[in-house]
Amino acid sequence: MTSTKTGSVHINVDAGKLHISDVIHVPIKTAWAMLTNRQHIAEWWGDYVSMEVRPGGSFEELWTNADGHRGRAHGTVMTVAAPFELDLTWREDDWNFVTKVSLHLRDLGTHTEVAITHADWPTSPDAHTRLILARHYYAWKSCLHRLKAYAARHNAQHRNAAAG
């Protein structure tokens, strides 16, 4: 486990679970909109991500790696409990297993703790699966960092608009 002043990371490879959290500096309703609204998602995650935020809705993320290989993650939205919880299945095209991603928000008044748990990885994973898990650790860490930066820009824009 590693920790920062506001967030933490837990990886339990043998239990098949990755957990990362941080505090973003917006109220929970704004944080929820940033996680579920297409225009917000395009700003911090990318315009290559689509999600129907309703139980049974689809999720898809497309990308191209540095070596030109195209990838796709896809799944189904399982739980939507606005503004606190969003769960979806997650599978990449070259996987023979399905994982679960859970986003949990905790109201801290003017701030929101965002926790991402990526679970149901194969237990006792082989070296390849461990590499995939490590790659997802860095990807989720980067995602949360971009969300936090986007929230800071959002706050600055609102402060400037109020002052203008």
Image: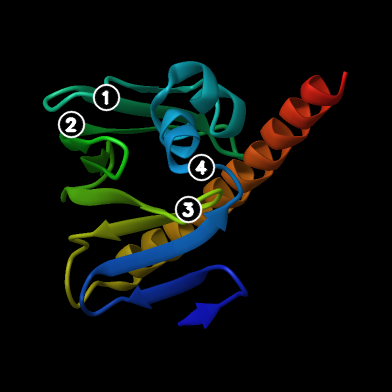
> From the viewer's perspective, is residue 132 above or below residue 56?
below
Query: Which tag, 3 or 1, sits closer to the chain's start?
Result: 1
Which label is found at residue 95?
none
Query: Which tag, 4 or 3, sits closer to the chain's start?
Result: 4
Which label is found at residue 76?
2
| Image side of residue 57 versus residue 32, left or right | left
Which label is found at residue 53?
1
| Image side of residue 42 versus residue 123, left or right | right
Query: Which is in the foreground here, disc 2 or disc 4?
Result: 4
Query: Which tag, 3 or 2, sits closer to the chain's start?
Result: 2
Report the Cα–Cα distance between label 3 and label 1: 19 Å
Name the residue at 28% across, 42% down: 94
Q: Position of residue 31 (x, y in %)?
A: 48, 38
At label 2, the amino acid type is: Thr
At label 3, the amino acid type is: Trp
Mark 3 crowdedness (10 Å alpha carbons): few <14, some 14-19, many ≥20: some
| Image side of residue 3 versus residue 160, left or right | left
Mark 4 crowdedness (10 Å alpha carbons): few <14, some 14-19, many ≥20: some
Q: Position of residue 113 (x, y in %)?
A: 46, 56
> From the viewer's perspective, is residue 94 above or below residue 114?
above
Which label is found at residue 27?
4
Quadrant of the drawing holding the N terminus = bottom left
Report the Cα–Cα distance between label 4 and label 3: 21 Å
Which label is found at residue 140?
3
Mark 1 crowdedness (10 Å alpha carbons): few <14, some 14-19, many ≥20: many
Name the residue at 78% across, 23% down: 162
Query: Which is in the foreground here, disc 2 or disc 1?
Result: 1
Mark 2 crowdedness (10 Å alpha carbons): few <14, some 14-19, many ≥20: many
